[in-house]
């Protein structure tokens, strides 16, 4: 006797499979939305924790190297974190004055740059005048009988104090958590091994975790060293040219270089603006931004591909989407960590067969296609 499922045949079975996939996709979509919601509204917690993990991964190769030479992980981690804290604190203290001065001089710098570039603005002067007239008319018209409500905002001092306290707390969480992560040694690996029953599964999981951690940590440390070298080169070159506050522009070049394409362009524009204001000769003023372009070109086209390799390159579309997403989520800090997080995700996906297509989508080139084309060509 045939049942209803036998009568319905494969169409009913296909319908059930389609419904289950639809439910699965819906659950994944809901989870992703909830996850993004949590990252946005709990950023005061997630941001320092994520930065601590990235810092720990960056310093892990050094801790591992020192452990091979007989130095305990706890001691080397403490020394590295203290040195990192002292270096960042010293640089921040030295840059606090120039940054505040630059922020206060920003309007005058903008006016001076506009005057120097007045020749280039002449074709657009008519449009700018019309825009100013429209704004003036809009501001001048007041509807009778309408009262304007102004909401009192907290004072500048109170907001600055709140920001300082929040930033100090976040920095403390970053360095303390990274210290514990580095000093823990192999504790997390032991926990992973204990979660598997069979010895073969334990070996496979341990090898996979070690490979992912080693590849990510090497990449982060290498990129951090390359960007530091770029900052030193830019700072020394601008100091030789005579641009004021070369330390500020060297640090800016190092930090913004974590943003491919965008960071270099922002650095060049800022240096060009200061150079136009500083030097009387227009030709000599172009020397500083040209030097920055030269340093970024050498770094991007020669040093990084030679040291890091092409395998971990990310395609430009994924980079711009990630930078836009993380900058919307966490602001400037999110934009800086967008590309390192992309590399972490790519390395993680490359080590799992079920996620390999995601890593292939993020990569700058399809290695499998490149390998197959010569074989087809030869016959």
Image: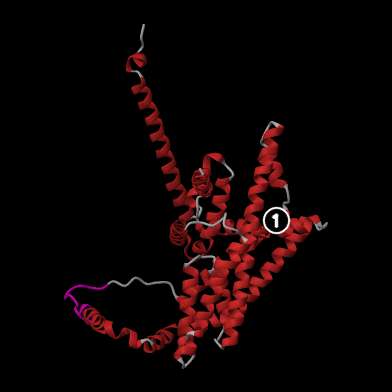
Mark 1 crowd level (few <14, some 14–19, many ≥20, 10 Å Cα): many
104 or 305: which is nearer to us?
305
- In the displayed image of the protein, which residue is found farthest to the left? 144
Q: Residue at x 74, y 55 (%)?
A: 64
Q: Residue 46, position in %: x, y?
A: 54, 55
Residue drawn at x 41%, y 38% as measured from the top left: 25
> Viewed as shown, does residue 324 lie left or right of 92?
left
Q: Residue 92, image x and y in percent?
A: 60, 75
**Main structural element of the magenta stretch: helix, strand or loop?**
loop
Classify 31 as above or below 62.
above
Q: Is residue 269 placed above or below 358 in the rendered structure?
A: below
Q: Position of residue 48 (x, y in %)?
A: 57, 59
Place of residue 184 in the rendered image (x, y in percent of width and height, measured from the top left):
72, 51
Q: What stretch of residues is rendered in magenta?
A: 136-148
Of the 4 image quadrants, the one containing the N terminus is top left
Q: Choose top left, top right, bottom left or bottom right for residue 149.
A: bottom left
77 or 269: nearer the viewer: 269
Quickly name the residue at label 1.
Answer: 182
Secondary-structure class at tag 1: helix
Q: Nearer the viewer, residue 148 or 278?
A: 278
């Amino acid at each position: 006797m045939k049942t209803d499922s036998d009568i319905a045949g494969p169409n009913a079975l296909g319908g059930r499979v389609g419904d289950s996939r639809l439910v699965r996709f819906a659950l994944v979509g809901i989870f992703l939305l909830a996850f993004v919601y949590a990252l946005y509204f709990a950023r005061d917690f997630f941001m320092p924790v994520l930065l601590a993990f990235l810092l720990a991964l960056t310093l892990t190769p050094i801790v591992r190297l020192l452990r091979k030479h007989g130095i305990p992980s706890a001691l080397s981690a403490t020394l590295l974190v203290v040195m990192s804290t002292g270096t960042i604190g010293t640089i921040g203290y030295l840059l606090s004055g120039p940054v505040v001065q630059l922020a206060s001089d920003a309007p005058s710098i903008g006016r001076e740059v506009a005057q120097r570039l007045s020749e280039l603005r002449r074709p657009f002067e008519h449009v700018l005048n019309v825009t100013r007239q429209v704004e003036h008319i809009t501001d001048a018209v007041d509807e009778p009988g309408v009262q304007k409500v102004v909401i009192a905002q907290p004072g500048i001092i109170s907001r600055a104090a709140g920001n300082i306290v929040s930033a100090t707390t976040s920095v403390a969480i970053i360095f303390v958590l990274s210290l514990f992560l580095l000093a823990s040694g192999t504790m997390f690996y032991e926990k992973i091994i204990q979660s598997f029953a069979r010895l073969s599964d334990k070996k496979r999981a341990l090898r996979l975790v070690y490979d992912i951690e080693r590849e990510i940590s090497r990449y982060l440390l290498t990129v951090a060293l390359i960007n530091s070298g770029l900052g030193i080169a830019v700072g020394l070159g601008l100091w030789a040219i005579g641009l004021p506050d070369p330390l500020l522009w060297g640090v800016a070049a190092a930090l913004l270089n974590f943003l491919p394409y965008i960071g270099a362009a922002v650095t060049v524009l800022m240096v060009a603006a200061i150079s136009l204001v500083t030097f009387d000769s227009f030709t000599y003023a172009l020397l500083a931004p040209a030097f920055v372009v030269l340093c970024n070109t050498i770094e991007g086209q020669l040093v990084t591909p030679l040291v890091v390799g092409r395998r971990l390159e990310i395609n430009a579309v994924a980079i711009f989407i990630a930078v836009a997403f993380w900058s919307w989520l966490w602001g400037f800090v999110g934009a800086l960590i967008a590309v390192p997080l992309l590399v972490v995700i790519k390395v993680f996906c490359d080590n799992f067969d079920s996620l390999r297509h995601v890593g292939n989508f993020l990569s700058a080139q399809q290695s499998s296609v490149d390998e197959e084309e010569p074989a087809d060509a030869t016959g």
